[in-house]
Amino acid sequence: KQEVTQIPAALSVPEGENLVLNCSFTDSAIYNLQWFRQDPGKGLTSLLLIQSSQREQTSGRLNASLDKSSGRSTLYIAASQPGDSATYLCAVRPNWGGGSNYKLTFGKGTLLTVNP
Amino acid sequence: NAGVTQTPKFRILKIGQSMTLQCTQDMNHNYMYWYRQDPGMGLKLIYYSVGAGITDKGEVPNGYNVSRSTTEDFPLRLELAAPSQTSVYFCASRKGGIVRDTGELFFGEGSRLTVL
């Protein structure tokens, strides 16, 4: 059974700092990995999606990397801003084939606070 | 583009009451999901559907029912509400289908349900 772990559970940084959020998974047979952002009382917004054949994806100040063999992904946020404060979740989708393909496994998230 | 729309946003139920959470998407997605999110527990899959007329149980289906009569709509029914069903419910969708999609998952804003 796939397990996804995000460490740390909470992180507080001063504005302007570069930071890394971690996501690890136990089964490397994944189709893709997706990073989400969740603001308080809101739904999940997709940030980046990395296919299993890719090593990284970039969007603005965000860069997500994937090391499938070691079961790890990182989300790098450059020059953090107070507006980046939110919970960040990662989710993995198993490989194509089999009923479990339809189901994503989510981590519990990292609560990020960027202080002005 | 509305994306995934959930109603109601908030609801308070008494124990034993029933209700339906509505979810509709306008992206012509084949796959739809219902998750519940409890503090510190991450997202748990309740039910999912891979197309109209096809539904299947997720991790925590007890106390819930779903139907998928159209591609757009995927309502979640709570029968005989219990305090344990107090949670935030999220509907999500992705393209899916015969041709491999990117796998990107899109979420609604959530429905916050309290059972007293």
Image (spheres, grey):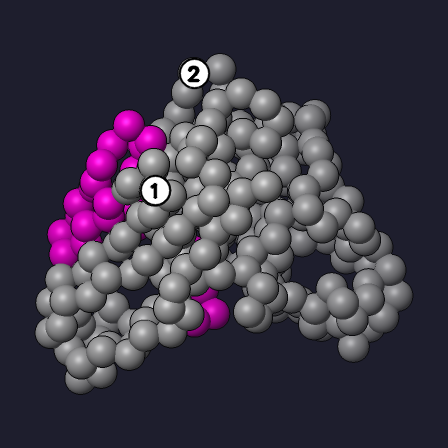
Q: Chain of mark 1?
A: A
Give residue B13's quadrant in the image. bottom right
Q: Mark 2 and mark 1, same subunit?
A: no
Q: Is A53 part of what is drawn in magenta?
A: yes
Q: In the rendered image of this protein, does residue B3 appear above or below residue B37?
A: above
Give residue B19's mark: none
Q: Residue at x 23, y 62 (%)?
A: A20
**Residue closer to the observer: A68 or B20:** A68
Callout 1, which amino acid?
Ser
Q: Secondary structure at mark 1?
A: loop
Q: In the rendered image of this protein, does residue B69 appear above or below residue B34?
A: above
Give residue A70's mark: 1
In the rendered structure, the answer to whether residue A85 lies left or right of residue A32 reads left
Q: Which residues are magenta?
A: A40-65
Task: Give residue B20's position: percent from left, percent from top.
Answer: 73, 53
**Residue closer to the observer: B47 or A21:** A21
Q: Residue at x 15, y 78 (%)?
A: A15
Q: Quadrant of the C terminus of chain A?
A: bottom left
Q: Secondary structure at mark 2?
A: loop
Q: Is B101 part of what is drawn in magenta?
A: no
Callout 2, which amino acid?
Val
